[in-house]
Image: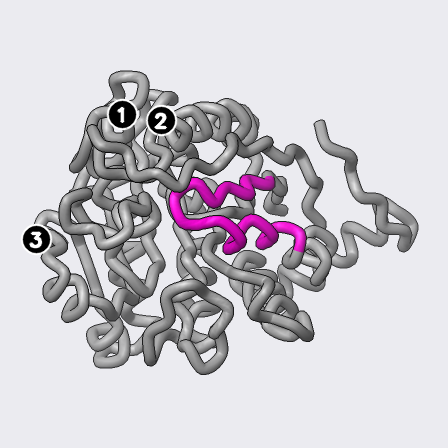
Amino acid sequence: MTDFTIIEAPSNLGLKPDSVEHLADALLDAGLARRLDARRHARLAVPPYDPRRDSDTGILNAARIRDFSVMLADIVGPVVARGGFPVVLGGDCSILLGNLLALRRSGKRHGLLFLDGHADFYQPDASPTGEAADMDLALSTGRGPDVLTNIEGLRPLVRDADVAVVGPRDAEQAHELGSQPLPPTIFAQDLDEVRRVGAEEAARAAVEHLSRQTPDGFWIHLDVDVLDDAIMPAVGYRMPGGLSWQELETILNAAMRSGLARGINITIFEPKHDTTGGIARDLVNTLTRGLVRSPDARLELCAQRQRRMGLRFSMARYA
């Protein structure tokens, strides 16, 4: 049974104020910890937001994102080391750096399953905002200023060959704004390709690629704007199209069935755009079905919880 461990990383340093910092609260209120039978382990304090774009790097809050990444890695690393499965609730996409740093410190070779509506591969001088959330994949693979690409001297946090990107649909917009394209050294299937082959085949190909490259396992990055805008409008930068709930569930199931997924971060959901809480509930339903390997496994999870707790749910306090 997977040892799900909730870590709250409500950083908006790579995006903008009043955006994603309440993601964790919304998903926990919608029952995520209870549904996963997860313990709540820690909630990180976030450095104050500075709206000024750094003149040296061209990135907002670059040094503070680095510091937050180190703090997050300090929490995530021991959970992975003991065999736990961190569920890191953001926050914006810059939290990916801290999670990959945790794995990189281990000295083992890990991969990245990158599920995002955007490729997030901007270089700072092309980014219209300077937000690290639109360049996190570039930074993770060692492209950009040292302060964020060479944290603790561990550039790159993940190698190109150890990345599988699934679902982006912003190539035309990114090209128009001058973003560097994803290189051929990164395995990528955009939304059109996912639709052409089907979500099950796309997931199989991505997981197979990661399994060959990184037998020590891989991290899952989930930006919820990979979902169709019609069902997930609670994001900051909206685009038409995207994955269905079922397609996302299929991809997560494939990752979990591999036995190589080491943790997941969930980013970009903005509860202020979900006034009824219905989108959060739908997201929690999909995450539960996706991360627990099968319907039979879900029933077993429930049975084990009932046996251990006598039908009573007791939320673990923060460590």
Provide the secondary structure element on which disc 1 rests: helix
x and y percentages locating residue 110 in the rendered image: 32, 35
The quarter holding residue 94 reads top left
Q: Which residue is mark 1?
A: 147
x and y percentages locating residue 132 in the rendered image: 32, 44
x and y percentages locating residue 309 in the rendered image: 87, 46
Say which mark, if any, is on residue 63: 2
Q: Residue at x 25, y 70 (%)?
A: 169
Residue 122 shown left or right of residue 282 in the figure: left
Say which mark, if any, is on residue 276: none
Residue 19 shown left or right of residue 184 in the figure: right
Q: Residue at x 58, y 58 (%)?
A: 292
Verify whether residue 16 appears in magenta.
Answer: yes
238 lies above or below 178: below
Of residue 78 and residue 209, the one placed in the foreground of this image is 78
Name the dominant secondary structure of the magenta segment.
loop
Name the amino acid type tagged 2: Ala
Residue 108 shown left or right of residue 276 in the figure: left
- The part of the chain drawn in magenta is 8-25
Q: CA distance from mark 2 to mark 1?
A: 7 Å
Q: Residue at x 36, y 42 (%)?
A: 218
Verify whether residue 164 appears in magenta.
Answer: no
Of badges 3 and 2, nearer the viewer stands 2
User: In the rendered structure, which disc, 2 or 1, sits on the residue that comes first in sequence?
Assistant: 2
Name the amino acid type tagged 3: Pro
Q: Coloring scheme of the render?
A: one colour
| Position of the C terminus by quadrant | top right
Name the amino acid type tagged 1: Val
Pointers 2 and 1 in contact (CB under 8 A)? Answer: yes
Q: CA distance from mark 1 to mark 3?
A: 26 Å
- Mark 2, Cα crowd under 10 Å, few <14 / some 14-19 / many 20+, is some
Q: Which residue is mark 3?
A: 184
